[in-house]
Image (cartoon, rainbow, N blue to C red):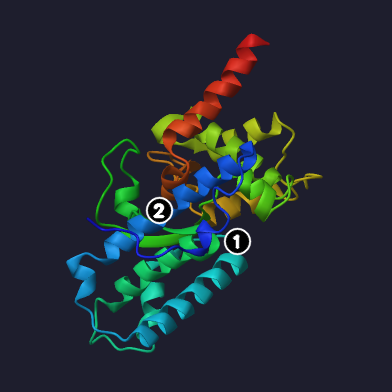
């Protein structure tokens, strides 16, 4: 049975106070440590222990990959990065004579992101154009292309207190939740683009008009597409090839269909009670 060999910086101060907030934070920190332990256990599996790289080589590659991901996450507003792109970061220093090395370095980076930053480098598969046309309720494909995105692993309360202020990104998150709820209401076929704008206008967000808090809503929709929360497709069997929006794989992975449906039920319930 694997045991934790040393304590990380995430342990600092855990459990040193009997106050309720510190007790809650200590529990959150234990959850982060459990996440790090899971990544550490994966690195002990046989497929990851047969690669012979020095500690210095490994540390240099992991650091370089983490810097690259942090820069991309900031400059591209959280858009996912492909597995191929991350492999190229590693193989530009080491050629393809070590084909499994990039995957090993990515695993180490996932561990270090949790330990050092309280962030998780999450992997998900982006379906091909053919696979994307299948119903969203179908079993997920193991083909497609592998992508990664950085997400905060901190609980919401810790994020608000330690990472950003109470209003930071709140407007975007509210807009994104509204859009996802609208898409979910229309089921697997997606929501026609015109219908989405009609529903957004009901909450004061109009196409082509800058919102005082959100800014240009078209740009926010494009940002959601880039982050793979939604995807835009041509409607099937439509003579004029109208666009429809559907839930994309990153929203399904990060948020989950049940959470989106919960937002819908809350809104519908409030309207029924009114």
Q: What residue did someone put label 2 on?
A: 35
Residue identifier under label 1: 77
- Percent of width and height locating residue 274: 68, 11
**Depicted 172 relative to depicted 88: above or below:** above
Q: Is residue 7 visible?
A: yes
Q: Which mark is residue 272?
A: none
Could you classify mark 1 by the number of other residues whose Cα lies within 10 Å: few (under 14), some (14-19), or many (20 or more)?
few
* Relative image position of residue 21 (x, y in whole percent): 63, 40
Q: Quadrant of residue 78?
A: bottom right
In the depicted structure, whether residue 203 falls above or below residue 30? above
Residue at 52% x, 65% y: name it.
Answer: 116
Circle count: 2
Q: Residue at (54%, 47%) from the top-left corner?
A: 15
Front in this rendered view, residue 7 or 258: 7
Whether residues under marks 2 and 1 lie with C-beta atoms below 8 angstroms apart, the answer is no
Residue 3: x and y in percent read 30, 58
From the viewer's side, name the closer residue of 41 and 242: 41
Residue drawn 50% across the image and 27% down it: 262
């Amino acid at each position: 049975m694997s045991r934790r060999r040393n304590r990380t910086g995430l342990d600092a101060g855990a459990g040193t106070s009997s106050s309720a907030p510190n007790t809650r934070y200590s529990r959150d920190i234990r959850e982060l440590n459990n996440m790090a332990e899971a990544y550490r256990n994966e690195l002990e599996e046989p497929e990851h222990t047969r690669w012979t790289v020095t500690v210095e080589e490994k540390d240099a590659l992991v650091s370089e990959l983490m810097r690259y991901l942090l820069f991309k996450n900031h400059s591209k507003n959280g858009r996912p990065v492909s597995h191929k792109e991350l492999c190229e970061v590693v193989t530009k220093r080491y050629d393809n004579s070590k084909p499994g090395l990039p995957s090993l370095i990515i695993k180490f980076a996932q561990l270090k992101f949790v330990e050092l930053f309280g962030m998780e480098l999450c992997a998900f598969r982006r379906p091909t154009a053919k696979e994307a046309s299948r119903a969203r309720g179908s079993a997920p494909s193991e083909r497609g292309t592998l992508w990664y995105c950085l997400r905060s692993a901190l609980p919401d309360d810790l994020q608000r207190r330690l990472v950003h202020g109470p209003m930071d990104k709140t407007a975007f998150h509210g807009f994104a939740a509204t859009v996802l709820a609208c898409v979910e209401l229309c089921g697997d076929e997606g929501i026609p683009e015109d219908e989405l704008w009609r529903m957004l206008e009901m909450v004061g967000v109009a196409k082509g008009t800058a919102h005082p808090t959100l800014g240009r809503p078209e740009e926010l929709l494009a940002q959601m597409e880039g982050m793979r929360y939604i995807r835009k497709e041509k409607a099937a069997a439509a003579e004029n090839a109208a666009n429809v929006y559907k839930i994309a794989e990153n929203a399904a992975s990060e948020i989950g269909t049940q959470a989106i449906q919960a937002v819908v039920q809350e809104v519908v319930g409030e309207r029924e009670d009114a």
